[in-house]
Structure formats: C-alpha cells, structure tokens
Amino acid sequence: MLAKRIIPCLDVRDGRVVKGTRFVNIRDAGDPVERASFYNSEGADELVFLDITASVEGRRAIVDVVSKTAEVVFIPLTVGGGIDSTEFMDQLLQSGADKVSLNTAALKRPALISEGAQRFGSQCIVVAIDACRVKSNSSPGLLKWEVYTHGGRTPTGRDAVQWALEAEQSGAGEILLTSMDADGTQDGYDLDLLAAVTGAVKIPVIASGGAGKLEHMYEALTTGNAHAVLAASILHYGTFSIAEIKEYLSEKGLPVRPVEKQE
C-alpha cells in the first residue's frame, strides 16, 4: 500500500495565508513563505498553495510568491489560482511548482485538462472540486453534491461525482476534493462525498475540508478511501503537528512517510 500523505494547505489572499469557515469568515494565518518552510521542516509530504481570490478577481496566481515558496521547500508543491492556459501552467512549473491545480477555468473549458496533461503529463494536473450538498428533486433520500467555482461563490449545476469522472477521463492525475459544508468547521470530512468520488474514479483523491481531530484524518483515509488528507486550521493554529498526525496514523496501521528529525 502506498504511503498516505499529509498535506498542509496554504490558502493565500493578498500575499497572506488565510483560513475561513465554509469559505467565509476569513482569518489571517501568517506569511506563506514562512509557513511553507515550517511545514517542509516538520515533515509534510506535500504542500498545496491556492490563491483563493485569483479567479474571482480575474487575475492569475502570484508567481513571485510561488517562486519564493519553491525556494524554501523540498517536497512537491501544487499551485492553483486563476490558471487558464497551458502557458501559465508552464510559467508556474518553471517557477518551482511541481503540479498545477485547475478549478474554475477547467469547468469553463474542460479541454484545458487534456491540454495540460498532454503537454506536461497527467502527474502534473490536479483538478480541484469544491462541492456542496444539494437536495435531489427526483429522489429526496439521494445524496448529491453540486460543484461551485470562483472560490465557492458560483454554483454550476454540475454534479461533483460526474465532474470528477470527466476530469479523470480528460487526463487529470489527481482530484483535490473539498467539502464546502465541512470546510473550516473541524467537525470531520464529508465521508459520504469522499466515498462517492473515490468509488467512482481510479486516480488518487485528496480529502479536504473539516479536519479537527486525528480521528477525522483516519476516517477520511479508511472509510472515505482517500489517498491523502489536506489540512489547514489544525496545522496553522498549532492544534496538531505533522509528527503527531503521522504517529497516530502509523499506530492505527496506516503507512506514512517517517518524519526525519531536523538537526
């Protein structure tokens, strides 16, 4: 079994790391370069850097911050925010990103996924899906999730599970799946959403939104069948360290990459 990955998420707005609840009530959480360097030394497996207002403001991710972040981390770095062309993907990858995360632009033009995969390889293409629970008119008891764009502001009418399948078929190498209902609540990941998507696609799925306890991460990786867990609040504000998370998961029988002690 492949090692389960622990991935801190750096949501960045106006050059600062921030964190909200259900995509609102934003709080400051520090400098992105400093946070990235800290998590790199703490034993994180990867980092995700998301410029959360790039699509809303009609601009692209802050390349200079990405470049500075890449200089201080030696683990895979995924970058997202306003990525709308393979040229911009190339600029970010040249600046030090290892993967790019596509969201709003890919929903507008799904061919962007296949264009990126063909040019850079599927391993570089992550499709981020922000999903919110909705009621099914035809089957009241049926669980469904609608995809949102522009940082969780715009409903698309698209079904999250179907969009994940389409993204996979278009060449995505990974899905970053965020539950808007659970985001920032620290009440646990949406296990139903996770299980629905991981059961539908064959590519790795990163669970995002809701981590508050160590048990939540274990549940996402087992019941939800995620390949990795994303976390923000519990790491940014010191609730748990990367080492504590990995020790817990290892004791529960899940394979994790050991945290190497820094000299």
Image: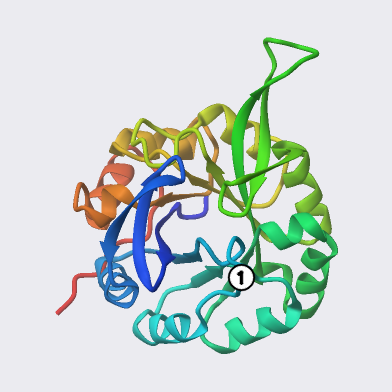
The residue singled out by tag 1 in the image is 100
Helix or strand or loop: what does disc 1 sit on?
strand
Where residue 73 appears, as percent x and y from the top left, is: 37, 79
Query: Residue furthest toward the top?
Result: 140
Work out whether 211 lies above or below 193. Answer: below
Where residue 183 appears, as percent x and y from the top left, is: 44, 40
**Display coloring:** rainbow
Where residue 76 appears, as percent x and y from the top left, is: 48, 72
Three-letter code for the amino acid on which mark 1 is drawn:
Val
Q: Residue at x 45, y 35 (%)?
A: 182
Count of labels shown? 1
Where residue 139 appears, as percent x and y from the top left, is: 76, 11
Question: Position of 207 compared to 185: left or right?
Answer: right
Question: Position of 139 compared to 206: left or right?
Answer: right
How many residues crowd mark 1 within 10 Å: few (<14), some (14–19), many (20+)?
A: many
Q: Residue at x 67, y 10 (%)?
A: 141
Question: Position of 134 compared to 32: left or right?
Answer: right
Query: Residue furthest toward the left?
Result: 263
Question: Position of 66 compared to 231: left or right?
Answer: right
Q: Residue at x 69, y 61 (%)?
A: 173
Indicate the quadrant containing the C terminus: top left, top right, bottom left or bottom right. Answer: bottom left
The foreground one among 116 and 184 is: 184
**Which picture quadrant has residue 59?**
bottom right
Work out whether 38 lies above or below 242. Answer: below
Work out whether 27 lies above or below 190. Answer: below
**Which picture quadrant has residue 123?**
bottom right
